[in-house]
Every structure is written in C-alpha cells, then in structure tokens.
Amino acid sequence: MTYARPLAELIGHLERLPGVGPKSAQRLAFHILRMAQDDVRRLSESLVEARTSLSLCQVCQNVCEGPQCALCADERRESSVICLVAEPRDIGSIERIGEYRGRYHVLHGLLNPLAGIGPEQLKIRELLARLSSGVEEVIVATNPTVEGDATALYLAKVIKPLGIRVTRLAHGMPIGGELDYADTATLISAMEYRREI
Amino acid sequence: MTYARPLAELIGHLERLPGVGPKSAQRLAFHILRMAQDDVRRLSESLVEARTSLSLCQVCQNVCEGPQCALCADERRESSVICLVAEPRDIGSIERIGEYRGRYHVLHGLLNPLAGIGPEQLKIRELLARLSSGVEEVIVATNPTVEGDATALYLAKVIKPLGIRVTRLAHGMPIGGELDYADTATLISAMEYRREI
C-alpha cells in the first residue's frame, strides 16, 4: 500500500522524531489531515520559528531568545550558587519546586566516553569561565545514572581545587514511594545517607 | 519556569497532538531545537503540504491527491468486492497482507450514538451509491470493538436487502498467540467459529 505522496512524506518526517514509531507517525499524520488548516499552519510556523529564533544564553547556555535568558537577566537571583543541569528542560524541573533562587548552568549532555562525549563536548569551559568570581557553591543536579554520576565526579575534581563547594542532589526514597518498589541502589543510598529524626 | 516564548509555543502546539503529553511535547521540542534547520523546514512544509494538497477520493473516500486514489484508479482490481474500513490507515493494514485484490471504502469513523456519530456522520451514503451495479460482496473490516460490531450489524441490515453478500473478518486466536494471554471474548469467538481440521 502506498499512501499519497504528501502523506507518505509527512509520515516519514514524523517517524524520525524521537519516541515516534511507524504506528504513531501514521496516527499523527492522519490527525493532522483532520486538523483545521489554520492550526496546521500555526504548528508548522512554530516549528521553524522555534528552530530559527532560539539560541543559547551566553551565560548559562539555556535555550533563549536573544543573547541572555530571563533567569540570567534576573538581578534578584543569587549569584553565589550555580545549579548544574544536563539539559535545558531540567531547569524547568528545578524551577517548579520554587525553592531554588540561584543561577543555572546547562551542560548540554553528560560525559559518556563510549559515545565519544568527553568534557570538550559539554559546556564545561563556559562553566569554568563563570567560576572566576563570587561563586561559592556548585550544585550538581545531574540524573543519578552512570553518566550523571561520572559527570558529577569529574566536575567535583575540576571545581573543588578552585576553592568552591561542590554538592549533589540527595539520593533516597522518593516521597510517597514504597519500600517494596524501591530498587536496591536507591535503598542502599537511602540507608547510607540516613538522617536522624 | 517560563521557557522562551517560541519554545513554549512550540511545546503548546505539540501537546495538542494525540498521544503527546506534556513530557513528550517537551522532549520533541528540544529535539527540534537540535535538528538541522533544513530538516525542520522540510518537516514544517510537509505538514502544510499534506494538509492542503490532500483530499478524499471521490469513489472510496480514501485520502489522496487529486480526485481519485491510486487504488480506485487501478483497473486491475476487482470491482465486485468492496472492503469496508473505518479509517484510511486501515487500508494499509489490509494491503500489507497482499492477498486482497478488490476495492475499498472508508467510513471515516464508526457508529457511536453516545458520541453523536450516527450513519449520517459516516461515508455510508457514498457507499450505498457505489453498490448500485456489479458489487457482489461487502467485507466489513471494522475493528472487533463495540462500535465496530454495531457498525457492522447496521451495515448488514442496510446492504443485505440489496441482494449483496455482507461478510466480516473472522475473530479468533491471533496466530502465534497464547491461550494463556487471550481474553475471554476472543476465546469465546474462537470456540464458536472453530473449524474442522
């Protein structure tokens, strides 16, 4: 079965997106055929606008319009703490808790020697340039995975000699989680870093 | 946390697609920011082209460019059998088996009185207009769901009086399936329509 060319092309383009298999590409494409033409046009324009108008913040490497992101431009945020995240979307996760008032820095990836990602491939040079003055603590908020751990250890080794505190998000039982469902590594971590009550 | 406006807008547009939640909309959006600009432009143009250049085949209501789809234009296909499907993508599923050489008709939905979808909302009038001459069998290939069954029964009632055979795809155990995992309704059906070997 060959779909009409424009439809087959659209399915092909959609299939290349992450997390979109052949089935969901088809479903999405047929959904688009049923959408209002104006909505399709807006989606289409939004794709190109996002791709062409956004760049990386010169300071923290977050995705933004213009040279500097809203967070870096915000004078009220504390400059002595930098929270280090792997991807721009991680900033959203931390901002949502509404507790953190310091700065951010986006690495755009994690160390992964097997995939050819070394320190040069991450925004580490840009980070070190920011550490020259006034920064007292770097909170490494990478995911608790092999790559996240390796990146945290590497950065601690590089940053600590500068006289700056390097901390990491605590590991442990998620609030509301059940012992029964927690994996061993999490439990070991929760046990190791147990606190007095 | 507010994302830069073009990014927030893109995420908003993506979230409205079926099967795309807030998380995957974010992931898709960040993927698009990393894609080559040319690829984004092609995807964007493909969306609008598919939406604007495709229409429904005047004969079978399949999605196509121009007035008639490739399947209806194919003179070698048998005209005495029409396979009735709910959605254009279902044609793909049946064409893939490579056994069926008749015609198709797309209903664009299934009867669902609770959702306000009656016979007038489906392409049934167009189907009946095709049944006037030479059609000997209508194969109802709707999904074996409540709506699929209801639609099949309704169509049988309407089409049989015209002296045309109405058949339905067999239900039963999927090949390679395990009894252990088959649901009761499938097993009942498989038992009821058991065949001699």
Image (cartoon, coloured by chain):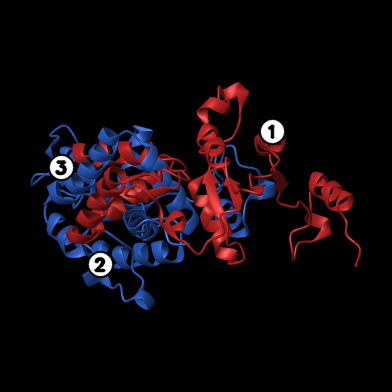
Chain colours: A blue, B red
Foreground residue among A41 and A96: A41
Crowd tier of the residue under label 1, counting other residues whose Cα lies within 10 Å: few below 14, some 14–19, many 20 or above: some
Secondary structure under badge 1?
helix
3 vs 1, front mark = 1
Do callouts 3 and 1 point to residues on the same chain?
A: no
Secondary structure under badge 2?
helix
Q: Residue furthest right?
A: B196
3 vs 2, front mark = 3
The amino acid beneath tag 2 is Val
Which of the numbered marks, if any, corresponds to residue B116?
A: none
2 vs 1, front mark = 1
Q: Residue furthest left?
A: A67
In the rendered image, the vertical position of residue A158 relative to residue A182, given as above or below? below
The amino acid beneath tag 3 is Cys
Q: Which residue is mark 2?
A: A158
- The residue depicted at 69 percent of the width and 33 percent of the height is B150
Foreground residue among B79 and A175: B79
Say if residue A193 shows up in the picture: no
Left or right of A137? Residue B160 is right
The amino acid beneath tag 1 is Ala
Which of the numbered marks, if any, corresponds to residue A69?
A: 3
- The residue depicted at 85 percent of the width and 52 percent of the height is B193
Q: Quadrant of the N terminus of chain B?
A: top left
Pinpoint the chain carrying mark 3.
A
Q: CA distance from mark 3 to mark 1?
A: 56 Å
x then y, percent, for residue A173:
57, 46
Foreground residue among A33 and A83: A33
- The residue depicted at 17 percent of the width and 42 percent of the height is A79
Q: Which residue is mark 1?
A: B150
